[in-house]
Image (cartoon, rainbow, N blue to C red):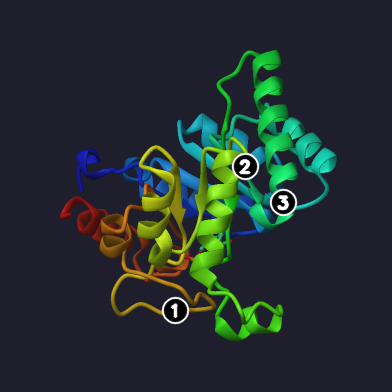
Amino acid sequence: MSATLADERLIVALDFHKADDVKKLVDELGDKIIFYKVGMELFYSVGTEVIDFLKSRNKKIFLDLKLHDIPATVAGGLCSLANLGANILNVHAFGGFTMMKNSAEKLREESERLGIEKPKLVAITVLTSINQDDWNGLGLSQTKISDTVIRLAKSAKSAGLDGVVASPQEAGLISEACGEDFLIITPGIRPAGSDINDQSRISTPAAAIKNGANYLVVGRPIRAAKNPVEAAENILKEIAGI
Ligand code: C5P
């Protein structure tokens, strides 16, 4: 596949716990993949070394640590992460408006102080793995998941965040409610016929983009495929065909 089919909108999730596995997949996928997601499994085991590695390969990084704590602690955590060189950082919208607003302000100030481009800050709305039973178990059966996602997205926008992480099924509603400049990152992507695993509110790559997603996060459909390069190429072709 030519480098021209590379598409920044596809973010590959590096849910490994060994640096060697990261290097193998990144080398295998080569120039096709520009954006990678580092989550807690990898960051907790390998640490900042993986960020340095991805930067040395000129990759973009979504550091998906999903911070969720009181406002001062989350803002402090983000300031500690600001200088690592990630392009996107995130917090849980369920941490509340005050936490999000404080985090956005402190991250802006810290980035100015460091003289770096501010990483985008996005909020997790409702995890794509949450199904109706989980939702009811949280005592939220009186509310619709999608209404809550929209409420959290609007709250994240007024708190000064750059976007949200949500299910591709909710992307259209978010873009209507928050406007086109507000980033929508969608995990829960499953090409037709692939295993759902522990995800619930899923869509195909094409449907996610049609619904207004700016970025698609894809992990197991690429990482666990017999041929990860072919799996990535197929998703890139599907996106390019829209
Ligand atoms: O393997 P799979 O494609 O399901 O991976 C999805 C990735 O996106 C995982 O790394 C997961 O942590 C992340 N994620 C998610 N749902 C969210 C936020 C992040 O699945 N709401």
| Residue 182, x across and y down, in percent | 44, 41
Residue at 28% in and 64% down: 207
Within 10 angstroms of label 3, few (less than 14), some, or many (20 or more) residues? some
- Res 110 quadrant in image: top right
N-terminal-most mark, 1 or 3: 3
Q: Is residue 182 left or right of residue 86?
A: left
- Disc 1 to disc 3, how far (Cα)? 30 Å
Within 10 angstroms of label 2, few (less than 14), some, or many (20 or more) residues? some
- Quadrant placement of the C terminus: bottom left
**Identity of the residue furthest to the left in this view:** 241
Rendered view: 22 above or below 201? above
Helix, strand or loop status at disc 1 = loop
Rendered view: 169 above or below 24? below
At label 2, which amino acid type do we have? Answer: Val
| Residue 3, x across and y down, in percent | 24, 39
* Pointers 1 and 2 in contact (C-beta within 8 Å): no
At label 3, which amino acid type do we have? Answer: Gly
Residue at 58% in and 64% down: 126
- Res 88 quadrant in image: top right
Q: Is mark 1 within 8 Å of ligand 1?
A: no
**Depth order, front residue of 60/77:** 77
Q: Which residue is mark 1?
A: 196
**Identity of the residue furthest to the front in this view:** 142
Q: Which mark is residue 50?
A: 2
Residue at 73% in and 53% down: 95
Q: Which residue is mark 3?
A: 96
**Identity of the residue furthest to the bottom in this view:** 133
